[in-house]
Amino acid sequence: NAGVTQTPKFQVLKTGQSMTLQCAQDMNHNSMYWYRQDPGMGLRLIYYSASEGTTDKGEVPNGYNVSRLNKREFSLRLESAAPSQTSVYFCASSAGPWTEAFFGQGTRLTVV
Amino acid sequence: SQQGEEDPQALSIQEGENATMNCSYKTSINNLQWYRQNSGRGLVHLILIRSNEREKHSGRLRVTLDTSKKSSSLLITASRAADTASYFCATDASTGNQFYFGTGTSLTVIP
């Protein structure tokens, strides 16, 4: 039982490069989320998808785009990476509103 | 921001002692959740308490919620070295589709 799977686990980008972080869940969850975690800042919500076909901005959406490809997959795209986007990115999913979230293992991204 | 804030930021105790950490938040909530994060890993859900509940237990965990003070506490009894981790509280927005996390408490349990 894989749960929430994120790829890649590590990535180094040069400023201005683009990349897509992939996330897939096998729990038939409706809701999916992308967070970033920075030292001393806790986790901050970037984007979320309450159901297949919908996406909404969270607290820190600037510089990111997302795609809810289907019910299983929710990707996060950095079009032009900046050093300020150096962070650990977590994908999560939940069955629906007001339910527990299940997290992936994270992607450690460094932008140089 | 609706982000919560945990207190203390760091806590170090001896194995067998109890650990208490607190969470304060800013706006009305439907639920409050506690998560644990081991170093270098994702978050793991511990317990969810609804706004109409005052106390909840799960094994060695006891969570309280005081909505009038907009605060919650997590008590871990008889701590073990394996409890060493960061602990986060999370509150939800009115739609329930957004979770807002606090900055976390780093707990170290010394064997």
Image: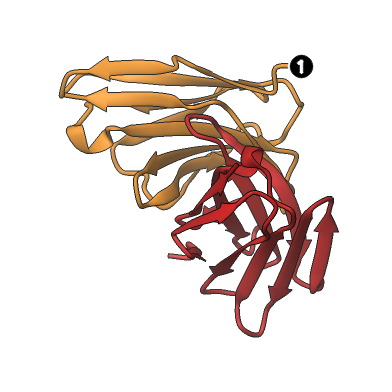
Amino acid identity at mark 1 = Asn
In the depicted structure, whether residue A5 falls above or below residue A102: above
Q: Is residue B89 shown left or right of residue B1? A: right
x then y, percent, for residue A25: 66, 23
Q: Name the residue that disc number 1 marks.
A: A1
Relative image position of residue B22 (x, y in whole percent) = 58, 67
Look at the image and tell me whether residue A75 can be seen: yes
Q: Position of residue A37 (x, y in %)?
A: 41, 41
User: SS class of the residue under badge 1?
Assistant: loop
- Which image quadrant for residue B42? top right
Residue A77 is drawn in which quadrant?
top left
Compare residues A105 and A50 and report the one nearer the observer: A105
* Quadrant where the N terminus of chain A is found in the figure: top right
Q: Is residue A51 left or right of residue A59?
A: right
Residue A60 vs B49, above or below: the answer is above
Residue name at image x 61 percent, y 20 percent: A24
**Colour red, chain:** B
Percent position (x, y) of residue A71? 67, 25
- Is residue A50 shown to the viewer in this render? no
- Mark 1, chain letter? A
The residue under the point 51% across, 74% down is B26
Given residues B58 and B49, the one toward you in this image is B58
- Residue A59 to residue A24: above or below: below
Tally of marks: 1
Quarter holding the C terminus of chain A is top left
The local crowd at label 1, few if under 14, some if 14 to 19, many if 20 or more residues have their Cα within 10 Å, is few
Residue at figure coordinates x 33%, y 16% from the top left? A11
Q: Nearer the viewer, residue B19 or A90?
A: B19
Q: Chain in orange?
A: A
Answer with left or right where residue A86 lies relative to residue B98.
left
